[in-house]
Amino acid sequence: SLLSMVALDEMAPSGNFVSKDVIDDAREWRVRHAHRDDYMDKSNWISLDRLVCDLDGSLIYGNMQVSRLKEIQFYTKSLDFFGVELPVGHTLALVCLAIFGLFIANELLNCILLLEALLTIPRNYRKTSIAEDGGELKLVCISVWRLLFMLGTVSVRILIAAILLFAGGQWLANTSAVSDLLLNCAALAFVLELDELLYMTLFPAFTKGIVSRLQPVRLREECMFRGLSWRPVAVLVVCASYVAWMSLQHVGPMTERMSEVRSTMCHRGPQDFVVGVQPVNGLALVALTNTTEEMRSKATLRKHVAEDFAFGNNPYGHNWSTREKLIEFSQKRRSENASAWVEGEAMFKTIMKMVEFPDRICNDILDTYGSQTAAFRLPIQYATGRFNTWTCTSLTDLCEQLDDVGFMVRRYCSRACQCTTNSFMAILRDGCLPGCLDGMRAEQTYRQHDIAGPHFADCKDQNDAAFFKSNAMLRYFSGFETLMNLPQGIMPHVNFSTQGCAAIPLLPVIMKDTSEVWQSNLIVEMLCGRVGGTNRAMSGAVGITTLRAHCPVTCGCTIDLARDCPRSCRRGANSVAVDPCRSGLCPNGASLNATHGVGLRTCGSIDYGVRNISDNQICEMQQALYRQACCEGIASEP
């Protein structure tokens, strides 16, 4: 029995809430892991703490914490017992302790009765005598040595029962899983019955026959009080005291620790936030996250596509019921209407690493492809929440937003958002297709004759009313203040509206009452995209839209042409962009040798061709190829 008790203690699971360390562990988990941005569900934007406290069973991180919270939930759950709310775990633990206590009491009573019987039998110094009495065996006397051995056996039984009462009771009281309480109680009762099991299965029939024929030893009559024996009363009092003591010392404190752990993990402070540390500047950021209820009611593109492919039925009429059918569909490439493309492993990894569309075409992706396949329509619909939107014209009001919605609208509606022109002054242009941004560079390279607005190819400060006297300027500076972490309204809108680009160098004076000198100087440099204290353009990604295209002279484009500057600034301030097609083959001051032949053509025919086409790129290339051969008296250009 003693060996069985030790084995059960080693093999059986111990409680998860035995010591107060579990509270410190819960607090440490909450601080170190529950609100980390890299452990959150980024697809649904839910913190790990919220997922754990909602008992999400599909987690990679935090599944042990979910198991503990489930134990706490089942253990502390209340049971309505005839109008009385009883905690299930606490009540069941006390019932199991009472049952176990009765088993121990029965064992101790048996030991007491055996001890009384041994002391009643006559003793002989040398031998034990048994006599036959009518087919039964009667124990006449017992030897002193056998008596001592039996007394030692009884003492061991009492010791085992006492140890089991203390250690087994603690083990049972500290069992935190409701499903394990009855199993552990049965295991402890099994330890007490093990000696009987060994006797019944291992002892020979001859020995068991002798024992069965022995007459019972007559004991003295039990004292009664009005027909009531003292032993049941004593057992009841001792058992009740034992259960009460275990409840106060173990079950009650463990229940309190459970409640404290649950409170530490889920109820102290908000759950819906994550903490991240910016890897470049080391700043800590806190982001608010969604609740599970919000995400259950919120549709996502990932869930939409997974549902289309997982259950075989989809609104597109495709058969995706087996892996083979998916492989067959993937071979059709992207010509079929579907919510997503189907790719192999290699192409999937390649596409997931892409940061831009592979081509440099400037178009509105939603208008061009959205009507053909849902794969190009669903991303913008889920990003904006406008599921009835099929064209870019209904999304242009979102082009200047600073969040992911603005990014997706600029990506799928680049042309509609005017990403092709420098007149588009959203503080962020990320998301615009590279092919459309190329249009801004072309706009600063060749003079546009068919527009009434500012000519961004000229090296002039464009104090255009379309920007400086409109709501576009107010939106631009509002976004600038947000990204620069400035108070809203700190930028002098009135000065820019009346003075245009000339207000930029005056900002340190204009803003002397609202900002420090260093701060206003920084604002000037950021608006112009310059390295602080110099006229050099910032290298790399500035991150925001600057005013260099609108104010090239003020922002120093005549000194450094590196970023967002018209090419004409290399000839100095207020230079006008030259139309390469209208100027012909030769520059001003040079004469054309029209009869000179170059290959199969004459210089005159080449000059005629340049003057009669409108493609500035071709004109410029023709001049570069034939100017030296066809033009006389060419002066060196600055």
Image (cartoon, helix red, strand yellow):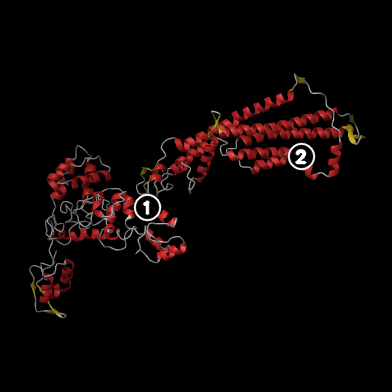
**Compared with residue 249, is residue 308 higher up or lower down, i.e. above or below?**
below
Residue 501 location, x and y as percent?
A: 15, 49
In the foreground, 438 or 236: 236
Q: Could you tell me the amino acid type at mark 1? A: Leu
Q: Is 88 drawn above or below residue 366 in the view shown?
A: above
| Residue at disc 1, secondary structure | helix
**Vertical placement of 249 versus 506: above or below?**
above
- Quadrant of image for the C terminus: bottom left
Compared to residue 120, the image places residue 62 above or below, namely below
Q: Are marks 1 and 2 in contact (CB under 8 Å)?
A: no
N-terminal of the pair, mark 1 or mark 2, is 2
Name the residue carrying label 2. Answer: 196
Viewer can see residue 428: yes
Q: Which residue lies furthest to the top in this view?
A: 226
Q: Nearer the viewer, residue 637 or 166?
A: 166
Tell me residue 598's x, y (percent): 15, 79
Q: In which quarter of the image is residue 50?
A: top left
Determine whether, in the image, residue 124 is placed left or right of residue 434.
right
Q: Which residue is drawn at 37% across and 65% down?
A: 333
Which residue: 79% across, 23% down? 222
Disc 2 packing (10 Å; few <14; some 14–19; many ≥20): few
Callout 1 environment at 10 Å: few (<14), some (14 to 19), or many (20+)?
A: some
Q: Position of residue 173 (x, y in %)?
A: 61, 34
At numbered mark 2, what does the secondary structure look like: helix, strand or loop?
A: helix
Q: Please identify the quarter of the rendering in which residue 617 is found.
A: bottom left
Q: What quarter of the picture does the N terminus occupy?
A: top right
Residue sitting nearer the eye, 502 or 301: 301
Residue type at mark 2: give it: Glu
Q: Distance between the residues labelled 1 and 2?
A: 66 Å
The residue tagged 1 is: 301
Task: Report the residue at 87% width, 32% height from top.
Answer: 144
Can see residue 540? no
